[in-house]
């Protein structure tokens, strides 16, 4: 996990020990930060997978074009 999220959870635990109502608020904030971070990471991963697939298709098209070019040269 990212550093700010870990720090937020540590602060949450400390708040729970000393001032539990503040710990509840800190827990909500930490949970929100964690979920938001996970969703952003999932979106980034999906975008990367799409990009990889596009590059793969592009490479296949280029390979077929090169093969066609060589076939025409051989004739």
Image (cartoon, rainbow, N blue to C red):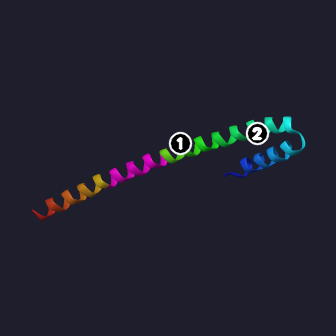
- Quarter holding the C terminus is bottom left
Alpha carbons under labels 2 and 1: distance apart: 24 Å
Marking on residue 8: none
Q: Nearer the viewer, residue 69 or 6?
A: 6
- Are the residues at dot 2 and dot 1 in contact (C-beta closer than 8 Å)? no
The picture quadrant where one finds residue 27 is top right
Q: Position of residue 55 (x, y in %)?
A: 39, 52
Front position among marks 2 and 1:
2
Q: Nearer the viewer, residue 55 or 6?
A: 6
Per the image, the residue denoted by label 1 is 43
The picture quadrant where one finds residue 74 is bottom left
Is 3 left or right of 59, judged from the image as shown? right
User: Which sits earlier in the primary sequence, circle 2 or circle 1?
Assistant: 2
The picture quadrant where one finds residue 37 is top right
Q: Residues within 10 Å of mark 2 (few under 14, many from 20)?
A: many
Q: Which residues are magenta?
A: 47-59
**Residue lying farthest right?**
18
Q: Position of residue 41 (x, y in %)?
A: 57, 46
Query: Residue at 33% of width from left, 50% of height from top?
Result: 57
Q: Position of residue 21 (x, y in %)?
A: 85, 34
Per the image, the residue denoted by label 2 is 27
């Amino acid at each position: 996990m990212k550093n700010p999220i870990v720090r937020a959870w540590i602060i949450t635990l400390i708040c729970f020990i000393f001032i539990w109502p503040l710990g509840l608020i800190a827990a909500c904030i930490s949970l929100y930060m964690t979920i938001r971070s996970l969703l952003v990471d999932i979106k980034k991963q999906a975008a990367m997978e799409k990009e990889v697939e596009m590059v793969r298709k592009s490479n296949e098209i280029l390979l077929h074009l090169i093969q066609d070019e060589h076939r025409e040269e051989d004739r």
